[in-house]
Amino acid sequence: MGQGKLTIRKVRAIKDPGLYGDGNTLYLRVAPGGSKQWVQRVVINGRRCDIGLGGCAWVTLAEAREMAYENRRLARRGGDPLAAKRQGKVPRFRQAAELTHDSLRPRWRNEKVAANWIQQLERHAFRRLGKIPVDRITQQDILDVLKPIWTAKPETARRVRRNIRTTLKWCQAHGFVNFNAAGEGIDGALPRMPAFKKHLRALPYKEVSEAMNIIDRCGAAPSAKLALRFVILTAVRSGEVRGATWSEMDVEDRVWRIPGERMKTGAEHRVPLSEAALDVLERAKALSGGGFVFPSPVRTGRPLSDATLPNLLRTTGLATRTTVHGFRSSFRDWCADTGEPREIAEAALAHSVGGVEGAYFRSDLFERRRRLMDAWASYLVRSHAKVVALRR
């Protein structure tokens, strides 16, 4: 094994943080706190890897040199010292996916996103991959999962591959695998899927007032009808409306301040309130919601569930013509046809404007958006009046 540069006395004397070479791929790593660990830097299958050999408190210099020698010999023969070191500790895919899921959870905005992430793997991947140790998963294993759904369910397939790839990326970061079997290497074995954007159902904006009238006349819970009316008048996403609290509303200044943690963009969004929107809030005061503007009629002190508004559209027969989100599209079409500036419309929808154009924005264009939302509400009210007049 040969004599290295370090000695027992030198190892004890070194105090400054850093990496100190002994030779033959063996190093002493001194952490800022003073702890000392043996580390080996060795090439395995063409890739440089760091292998921890233990702390100096329980692994002697001679023992570290012996372990480094054995690892070098195994690597020269085409073996993988890291795989031998991990034996018995490598998680199976299901366990690794659950650990990855837990690590990602703080980044997601709500439990629905978190639940969907793991459910995609539960439905399409765990049966094939769940019990396999992650370092034994091959590209063919990944293809066996993806091929049956790649063309039949392209969006689902993309998500499943993304989640598998993310899991193996987590495994790679923790030293359980050396490469990502769900990476670019399998692209050639999968049919190319053209990028496409599925357009959600949306009413022509000229029909929105009549839809509001239908909603008002239906027998749904008052909180659900008012919430959907508020979605239409403010052009805000349904989740942000359902979670709205009275503490966010400033009726005197006619503004609704949605905190960043509830926004898709992560930034606070100020929503100007038209007279019609303020009327909705006035009517909502009669509801008992424990702080929520649009409380659940069945779960005391909780907001409306995410299924409430789509169910309302189904009961009124509007679901075949629009989604809840589709009312935002109706608003955007109205903005375009009436010549409203693009940046004002996009700001009203809380869309991020990218590229050079977005880089120059330093304002949320609030006062200009107030005029826009007042005009949108006035249009809906006028249209509603015309519909009523025609019926008489």
Image (cartoon, rainbow, N blue to C red):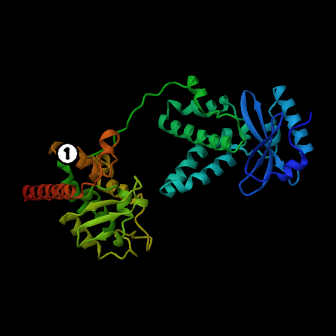
What amino acid is labelled 1 in the image? Pro
Along the line of sight, which residue is nearer the eye, 323 or 189? 189
- Residue at the spot 47% in from the left edge and 28% down from the top edge: 193
Quadrant occupied by the C terminus: bottom left
Q: Name the residue under label 1.
A: 341
Judge by depth and name the residue closer to the eye, 359 or 240: 359
Residue drawn where x is 42% and y is 62% of the image: 305
Residue 101 screen position, x and y as percent: 60, 51
In percent of width and height, residue 44 lies at: 76, 30
> Which secondary structure, mark 1?
loop
Vertical arrangement, residue 215 with respect to residue 249, above or below? above
Classify residue 363 by image quadrant. Answer: bottom left
Judge from the rendering whether residue 164 lies leftward or rightward of residue 322; answer left or right: right
Outermost residue, top side: 188
Left-right relation of 370 to 19: left
Q: In this view, does 358 lie to the left or right of 195?
A: left
* Residue 332, image x, y percentages: 24, 46
Front residue of this view, candidates 148 and 158: 158
Residue 226 against residue 210 in the figure, above or below: below
